[in-house]
Image (cartoon, rainbow, N blue to C red):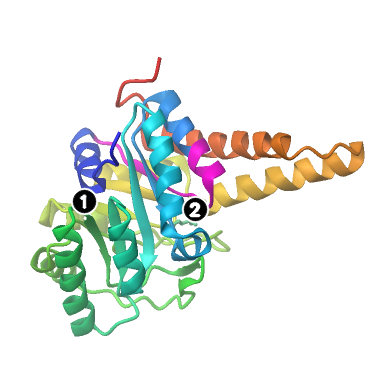
Amino acid sequence: MAFASTRELCLAARADGYAVPAVNIVDGLSIASAVKAADSVGSPIILQTSVKTVQYFGAAVLASAAQAAADAASVPVALHLDHCPQRAVITEAIAHGWSSVLFDASDRDFDTAVAETAEVVAEAHAAGVDVESEIENIVGVEDGVGSDDPNVHFYADEELVRVASETGTDLIAPALGTAHGLYTASPVLLVDRVARLVALTDIPVVLHGGTGLSAEEFQAFIDAGVSKINISTAVKLAYMHASRDHLAEAERSGKWEPVKLFDQIGAAVEQAVLQHIELFGSARRVAVTA
Ligand code: 13P
């Protein structure tokens, strides 16, 4: 089926008190495995591509792999471009049928960020594509994009919502105390901020930096109204650890079979995605494939 609208998946999740897993995929294998996991338990899923992944494979290859996986599934699948400060890559994703793009303007000054977000929204909406907007820095570097500077510049909640409304933003990515990558110290989570934003606007609120949060922390964010949760590092670790384990065993046994390697990686990615689907309460929301 055609890609789902990221915004519509999130609005449905918010209305029913769960969050849609937004999983960063890195190739055709992780695309197929993530969609298989979602399809096996009746969960909607958002596949996310970093700018680096788009540049590595090319937008056409990724879009067709995601489309093939979506066609084989009975659950809604959206394709989303994660943190993208580069307007040319946004244009490319729009041209290749992505459901949504995250225009990351957190490296711009306020006026430039607002003006460019409005331009991106106009360009994306003309093609039926949703826009997630980020004007505050979410700590941590994700596939080469972002910053490790812990000094986030927060805008007032009302200001953030005003900018989102005035620019026509479809999803807001505020700083919520989480960080991309593995936590080296316990984060100070801004769950109350989600509740305040949700009270101010119907625009879905996105939680970045999901890897490493506990079941209780995810639930607190979902209860407060978060409806899209991004998971990247946990999937990458599952992928790489399965590769390492398989190659170590191949070395030991002297049996080198690439398809068996793919099997082991695919199973690990599927397991990691299933785990988060259960944590986010998105299972059994849509019909399961027979
Ligand atoms: P993690 O790498 O912490 O899971 O964060 C993912 C993310 O927010 C992608 O935008």
For badge 2, the amino acid type reads Ser
Quadrant in the picture for residue 282: top left
Residue 44 or residue 63, whichever sits in front: 63
Q: Is 203 on the left or on the right of 174, as rendered?
A: left
The magenta stretch spans residue 25: yes
The image shows residue 62, relative to residue 8, as above or below, that is below
Residue located at (22% from left, 54% from top): 129
Quadrant in the picture for residue 102: bottom left
The image shows residue 224, relative to residue 145, as above or below, that is above
Disc 2 CB within 8 Å of nearest ligand 1 atom: yes
Residue 28 or residue 85, whichever sits in front: 28
Q: Which residues are magenta?
A: 17-33
Q: Which residue is mark 2?
A: 232
Q: Which residue is mark 1?
A: 204
Residue located at (14% from left, 70% from top): 163
User: What crowding class fits label 1: few (fewer than 14 Cα within 10 Å), some (14-19), or many (20 or more)?
Assistant: many
Badge 2 marks a residue whose secondary structure is loop
User: What crowding class fits label 2: few (fewer than 14 Cα within 10 Å), some (14-19), or many (20 or more)?
Assistant: many
Q: Earlier in the sequence, mark 2 or mark 1?
A: 1
